[in-house]
Image: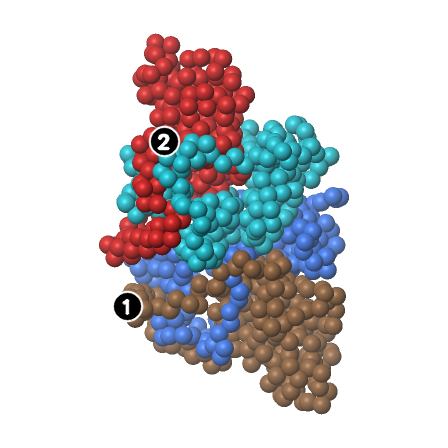
Chain colours: A blue, B brown, C cyan, D red
C-alpha cells in the first residue's frame, strides 16, 4: 500500500523540533501502551503484521496522532481483527522473569537454516524495482526505479511482504544498498552524499549499465 | 535545500485537552484489562517492561559501547566488523537490537540514522526513541535534505564532508560511532562515556569536549 | 515542495464515495468562500501563488479539511501575508457586470506574444526531470524520472514555478506527455493503459533510448 | 489492483459539529467584511458570482456540447481539433475553461480526468466539481488504479479497452466526449443532452440509453 506512512522525501512538515530533557514516557498511559505492545505483541501476530496495522490507519488520523496513540489504535484494531479475546491461550501468561529473558534475547529475523545463495555481490549495480503492492512492503516509494550499488550482505532474513499477510516468512537475502543522493533527488542534491537502505532480494533487479 | 515554505511543526504545538487525555487513559485501561483478564499478559509483566525501558535500557548503554571503542582499538575493529557480537561483549542485546551495525564518523564522513517507514531504533543501546525521531518532520526530510535537518539541530556539516543517511527499513539497527572529542586522550573510559549523547549516536550531534 | 497535496499514486484513502444528488454548495459559508476566492483572488496575487497558498497548509490540517475549508484557510493566509488590507486599492471595486464579463472571458494562461520555439515535437521521447524544488511546482512526484512521449503541444504558457513566487511569468512551451502505466507503476499495471499529463519544457529532457 | 487494505474514506464520515460550523461561518463573515470594507470586492459582486455558478454555469452546458457533437459530425471534428473554439461556438467560455481539450471515448478507448495536485476542473462546461472529485481518495488513486476507481462507480472497463487518465496539471481543462447511447439515432439533440451526465463527461460513467 502506498500509504501516508511512507514519508521519505516529503518536505512539508516543517523544521525538526527536539524537546529538551525529554522523558522516556510523557504519561502513564504511554507506559502501559508501550508495555502492552511489547509484551502482548507476539500473541497478536508477527512484527510485520503489527507494523502494517499502523499503516492501515486512516491517513488523517495517522498524521495527527502521536506515536503512542498510533500504537494504541493499532493494538485495538489487531486485537479485534484476530479475535484473540475470544480464544484465550491455553498456557499461562509469561512471568515477568520469563518475559525479561525475551527482552534481552530478542527475536532475530535472520533464518540461517533457510540460507539462500545471494544473487548479488558487494559492488553490484542494482535497480530497486517499481513495485506498488497493495499490502505491506518495506520498499519505500523514494527508491523505486532508482539505481544503487550493493554495499553489504546481511544474510537471509524474513520477508515482510509475505510475513505481514500470513503468507509465511519466505526468508531471502537481505542487502544494504547505497544510492547516490543525486540519483534519488536529482542534480540539486549534494554529489557527495548518499543514502543506505536495507532491501530484500525480491525488491532488486540487476542493472548492468545506465 | 532551504525550507522557506515549511509551516511550523504541527505535532508539538497542539497539546491534548484534559478530556482527550482522559479518553486515551480509558481506552488504554480497557485494553489492558481485556488482555490481562484473559491471561494473555500479566500486569506484573507490563510493570517489568516499563521498569526495564525506563531504568535499565537507555542511551547510557550505547555511550559505554562508544567510549569502549574509543579506548580499545581492537574492540573498535570488532564493533565495526560485527556490531551485534561486539555489543554483546558488554552485555547489551535484545529486542530491536538483534542485528546491529555500527557506522563510524570521521573527519571525512558523517553518518545519520532514520526510519522513514515507521520509527525503528536500536533499543538495547539507545533505549526508546525521542519524539522528534518519530516525527514526520524528521522521518520525511532527513533523507532528502540531511544537511538542512542537521542544521535544525545546530549542526553544520562542511560541504567537503560526505553525509551518509541510513534508512532502517529492515531489522538491522544502526549505531553511529561518533568522533571522539578533541581532549579524549586526557580522559578515562568512564568520563568519556559521560560525554556521549543519544543525539551523537543517532548522528544529529557531535560529542563535545569534556 | 514535496507536499501532502501531491497525492498521485497513494492508495491509502479508501474507496471513492460519491454523494447522490450533491448540491453545488452545502452551506451558505461555502457560497461566500467560493465567491471571495473567485472575485477577490486576482487582487491577492496570481493563481499559482494562490494554489501554493493551499499547498503550504500544515499536512494534518490539509488532510482533514474539506475543499472550501482549504479555500478559506488559504485566503486568510494570503490576505495577511500580502498585507493587502493595509493598502486598499485606489480604483473602485469591480461592479457585478464588470466581474461577470471576466467570468465569461476567463484569464488565459497562454502567452502568444512570448511564443518560444518548442524543443520537442510530437512523438519525441522525453524524461521528466527529477526536480525537487522547495517552492511551488506542477511536476508531481509520480512522473519524476519517468520516460514518456510528447503527445501534443499546447503553445507557450505561464510557468507556475516562477510565477507563484513573484519571479515572473517566464512563459515557455507546454506539452501533453503520455506515460505508459507500466512505466509509472511497474509491471503489475495494465500494459494497455496510460497517463497523459501537461508538463512544461523546463520539466523535461530528451531521452534518445532506454 | 485491489484495495483490501484501504480504510473507509474518513472524509465523508465525520460531519462537522454545530460549533465547528458556527466557527467557520464567523471566519468567513470576518473575511468578507474585511475585503468589502476596504473596497477590494463588493457584496453585490460576490452575490453575482454565487448566482452564476449556482444557476447558469453547470454540467447542462457540457451536455449540450456533447449532444451537439453527437448530432453534427463537423462540430465533433472541430471539438476534437480545437475544443476551446468549438465550445465557444455554443456560447460557453471563461474562467477555468480558457484552454479546453476534448477527449473521445470509443469502443476501444476510455478516458477519465483528474487533477492530482489540486482539483482543476472545466468550470464553463461542467460547473463546480463534486466533492468526490476533490477528495484525496479520487485524486490519489485514479492515476495508479483507474480500473479500481471506476469500479467504485460501478463501471467495469473490459481488459481489452485502453484507459487513458488525464491529469490536469496545467491550465488545460479536459472534457470527455462519451460514447452516444445505443438508441441515439432515435432521439433529437435536446433529448440526448438530457441524458448526458456530469460523471460521463469526467469519465467515471457511461451515458445510459434514454
Q: How far from the left and from the top, in percent, is residue A159?
A: 55, 53
Residue D205 appears left or right of C130: left
Quarter of the image where one finds residue D94 = top left
Above or below, comparing residue D141 to residue B33 in the picture: above
Query: To which residue does mark 1 refer?
Result: B19
Q: Given the image, what chain letter belongs to the residue carrying mark 1?
A: B
Q: Are marks 2 and 1 on the same chain?
A: no
Q: Residues within 10 Å of mark 2 (few under 14, many from 20)?
A: many
Residue at x-position 44% and y-position 17%: D69
Q: Nearer the viewer, residue D14 or D6?
A: D14
Where does the image place residue B135, in percent across and percent down from the top left? 49, 64
Q: Could you say where residue C3 lies in the image, as x and y percent from the top left?
A: 51, 52
Using the rendered image of the protein, determine whether residue A59 is visible from the camera's viewpoint.
no
Quadrant of the image containing the C terminus of chain D:
top left
Pick the residue in front: B82 or B40: B82
Which secondary structure lies at badge 1? helix
Is residue B188 among the parts visible in the rendering?
A: yes
Q: Is residue B82 above or below residue D83?
A: below
User: Residue drawn 68% across and 54% down?
Assistant: A188
In the displayed structure, does residue A145 sit left or right of residue B132?
Answer: right
Q: Which residue is mark 2?
A: D57
Query: What is the tally of numbered marks visible in this picture?
Result: 2
Q: CA distance from mark 2 to mark 1?
A: 47 Å
Amino acid at each position: 500500500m502506498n500509504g501516508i506512512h511512507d514519508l521519505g522525501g516529503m518536505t512539508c512538515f516543517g523544521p525538526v523540533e527536539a524537546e529538551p530533557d525529554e522523558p522516556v514516557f510523557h504519561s502513564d498511559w504511554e507506559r502501559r501502551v508501550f508495555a502492552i505492545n511489547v509484551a502482548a505483541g507476539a500473541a497478536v501476530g508477527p512484527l510485520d503484521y503489527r507494523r502494517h496495522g499502523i499503516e492501515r490507519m486512516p491517513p488523517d488520523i495517522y498524521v495527527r496522532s502521536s506515536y503512542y496513540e498510533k500504537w494504541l489504535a493499532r493494538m485495538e484494531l489487531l486485537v479485534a481483527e484476530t479475535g484473540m479475546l475470544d480464544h484465550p491461550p491455553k498456557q499461562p501468561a509469561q512471568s515477568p522473569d520469563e518475559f525479561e529473558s525475551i527482552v534481552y534475547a530478542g527475536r532475530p529475523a535472520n533464518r540461517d537454516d533457510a540460507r539462500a545463495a545471494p544473487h548479488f555481490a558487494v559492488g553490484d549495480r542494482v535497480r530497486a524495482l517499481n513495485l506498488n503492492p497493495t499490502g505491506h512492503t518495506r520498499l519505500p516509494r523514494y527508491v523505486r526505479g532508482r539505481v544503487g550499488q550493493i554495499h553489504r550482505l546481511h544474510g537471509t532474513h524474513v520477508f515482510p511482504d509475505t510475513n505481514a499477510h500470513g503468507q509465511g516468512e519466505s526468508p531471502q537475502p537481505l542487502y544494504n544498498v547505497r544510492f547516490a543522493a543525486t540519483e534519488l533527488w536529482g542534480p540539486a542534491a549534494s554529489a557527495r552524499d548518499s543514502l543506505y537502505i536495507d532491501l530484500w532480494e525480491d525488491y532488486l533487479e540487476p542493472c548492468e549499465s545506465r | 535545500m532551504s525550507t522557506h515554505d515549511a509551516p511550523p511543526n504541527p505535532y508539538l504545538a497542539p497539546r491534548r485537552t484534559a478530556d482527550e487525555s482522559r479518553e486515551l487513559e480509558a481506552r488504554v485501561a480497557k485494553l489492558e484489562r481485556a488482555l490481562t483478564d484473559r491471561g494473555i499478559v500479566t500486569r506484573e509483566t507490563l510493570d517489568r517492561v516499563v521498569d526495564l525501558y525506563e531504568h535499565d535500557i537507555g542511551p547510557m548503554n550505547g555511550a559505554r559501547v562508544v567510549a569502549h571503542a574509543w579506548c580499545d582499538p581492537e574492540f573498535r575493529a570488532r564493533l565495526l566488523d560485527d556490531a551485534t557480537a561486539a555489543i554483546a561483549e558488554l552485555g547489551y542485546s535484545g529486542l530491536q537490537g538483534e542485528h546491529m551495525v555500527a557506522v563510524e564518523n570521521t573527519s571525512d564522513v558523517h553518518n545519520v540514522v532514520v526510519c522513514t517507514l515507521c520509527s525503528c531504533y536500536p533499543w538495547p543501546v539507545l533505549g526508546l526513541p525521542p519524539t522528534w525521531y518519530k516525527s514526520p518532520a524528521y522521518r520525511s526530510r532527513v533523507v532528502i535534505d540531511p544537511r538542512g535537518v542537521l542544521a535544525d539541530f545546530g549542526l553544520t556539516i562542511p560541504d567537503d564532508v560526505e553525509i551518509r543517511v541510513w534508512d532502517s527499513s529492515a531489522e538491522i539497527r544502526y549505531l553511529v560511532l561518533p568522533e571522539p572529542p578533541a581532549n579524549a586522550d586526557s580522559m578515562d573510559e568512564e568520563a568519556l562515556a559521560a560525554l556521549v549523547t543519544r543525539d551523537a549516536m543517532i548522528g544529529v550531534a557531535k560529542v563535545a569536549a569534556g
